Amino acid sequence: MNRFSQALFSGRMITTAAYMPPAGSDPGAIKTFSSTLPPDLDAVVVADNPDRIRSSAFSAAALLHKEKKTSVILAMTTRDRNRIGLISDALGAAALDIEAILCVSGNHQAITICPQAAAANDIDSVQFIQAMKKMALFGDELNDKEAKPGLKLQVGATAHPSMRPLDLNLLRLKKKISVGADFLITQAVFDLKEFEEWMDAVRAAGLDKRTAIIASVLPLTSAEKAAALQQSRIYGSLEDAVIKRIGSAKDAVREGVSIASEIAIQLKEIPGVRGIHIHSDGCESLAAEVINQAGLQRKK
């Protein structure tokens, strides 16, 4: 097993963090980020153009892997590639010993990224998970009739605890797990009651026993950003008290870190939660603060 899979199957609480590749082409930005990686991270998830056109996630993942500071999870969106491109990039990632693929659909390109672009959407994220799992089990031929050495890839997917109705939410979750998702990274959690309701349903269906559920937090950096998230409801409910707390703080960024840390402390105590993921939204340096405040340091 690779390093990330060892963390997954160890039974302990695992910690991951997101990395947004730079919008430019300077490799120095990636090397600078690598030099500041918190030692307690089990893996870095390299985002794939989630909000704008950025430097290649594949290239950023390769550069981070070369530094060998932590495991690297490469996010790949079905929005931007057909199945040929997806499989080709996954084979390349495996050849570079990148340890996991996070299969995502991606936000619609009209949402701030590039409205003029045409999406591929040749296969959806469930089909992509299934294809990656076949590669992991049977090698690069994607042919289960003739077993070949499997690729050293863990396969992950995303989960959306705030989506309702709950029955439909669980139906899609079951599909992702059934076709082979080894781990699930949730959207950022702000409404703990809503998340606990989702986890109750996940445990009742026995899904927490079949995959590793990694709950996410997002350090908010301003009251304006918090208000925008509240209006969009992209991460579910966000209370007015959170916006007021950040807005009245002397240091909005530090307050955002404190809120994310408080949520992480509560999330890791919920039965079935196997790890905490720290979204960056471009502020990767905040991950170390959340780890320290939330007590996510790796036990020796």
Image (cartoon, rainbow, N blue to C red):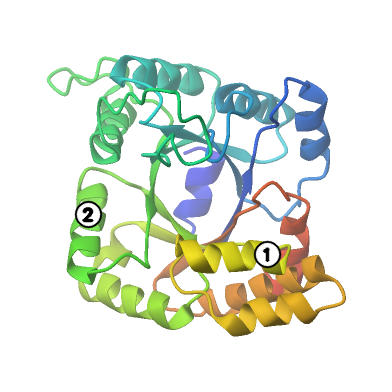
Q: Residue 246 vs residue 152: left or right?
A: right
Q: Are marks 1 and 2 in contact (CB under 8 Å)?
A: no
Q: Position of residue 205 (x, y in %)?
A: 20, 70
Look at the image and tell me whether residue 156 can be seen. yes
Q: Residue at x 23, y 35 (%)?
A: 127
Q: Nearer the viewer, mark 1 or mark 2?
A: 1
267 is higher (above) or lower (below) than 172: below
Q: What residue occupies the far right of the structure in this picture? A: 250
Which residue in the protein does label 1 denote?
Answer: 224
Q: What residue occupies the far front of the structure in this picture? A: 116
Q: Position of residue 75 (x, y in %)?
A: 49, 36
Q: Residue at x 33, y 21 (%)?
A: 149
262 or 223, which lies in front?
A: 223
Specify the amino acid type for callout 1: Glu
For the C terminus, the quadrant is bottom right
126 is higher (above) or lower (below) than 284: above
Which residue in the protein does label 2 denote?
Answer: 172
Specify the amino acid type for callout 2: Arg
Look at the image and tell me whether residue 219 can be seen. no
Between the residue at mark 1 and the residue at mark 2, the CA separation in whole angstroms equals 33 Å
Residue 198: image quadrant is: bottom left
The local crowd at label 2, few if under 14, some if 14 to 19, many if 20 or more residues have their Cα within 10 Å, is: some
292 or 168, which lies in front?
A: 168
Q: Residue 63 vs residue 7: left or right?
A: right
263 is higher (above) or lower (below) than 152: below
